[in-house]
Amino acid sequence: MKTITIIFRHSPHGKANSREALDFALLSASFEQIVSVIFVDDGVLNLLPNQMPSKIGCRDFISTFKALSLYDIEDVFVCETSLVSMGLTTQDCFIDVEALSNEQIKQRLKKADEVLVY
């Protein structure tokens, strides 16, 4: 069993990065891998509620983040620096997340068998 950390770095719409990362996270967890996810930079925008991607012709995958816990993905983190730079707090996120400092993120990445950046 591998420990996989998936980093969301891009905003949710305009590119498929976030959707692909989410699909990969759920797929990996379904094969009983230990998965954790970290939202950094513009990836923090994936955590904002009340998005309406259909208005810009994009697929609505954002609500699927609520399924992370159903797949036993309990380690869901957000970069504290990225969150603060956007004027947000963890209370602004529509799923439960834990804010980590840059140093804490580095420590998490060192413990992972694989790190994938989307």
Image (spheres, rainbow, N blue to C red):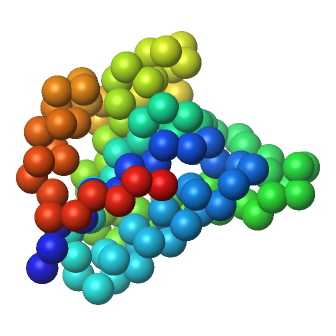
Is the residue 46 above or below the residue 31 in the image? above
Residue 95 visible in rendering: no
Give coordinates of residue 22: x percent, y percent: 49, 64
Q: Residue at x 29, y 85 (%)?
A: 31
Q: Residue at x 18, y 47 (%)?
A: 109
Give coordinates of residue 21: x percent, y percent: 48, 62
Is the residue 64 above or below the residue 40 in the image? below
| The quarter of the displayed image where residue 51 is located | top right
Give coordinates of residue 83: x percent, y percent: 45, 23
| The quarter of the displayed image where residue 89 is located | top left
User: Total label count?
Assistant: 0
Q: Quadrant of the N terminus?
A: bottom left
Q: Residue at x 34, y 82 (%)?
A: 30
- Closer-to-camera residue (66/16): 16
Q: Residue at x 46, y 48 (%)?
A: 8
Residue 98 visible in rendering: yes
Query: Left or right: 78 with respect to 4?
Result: right
Give coordinates of residue 3: x percent, y percent: 17, 66
- Closer-to-camera residue (71/82): 82
- The residue at the far bottom in this view is 31
Query: Left or right: 98 with respect to 20?
Result: left
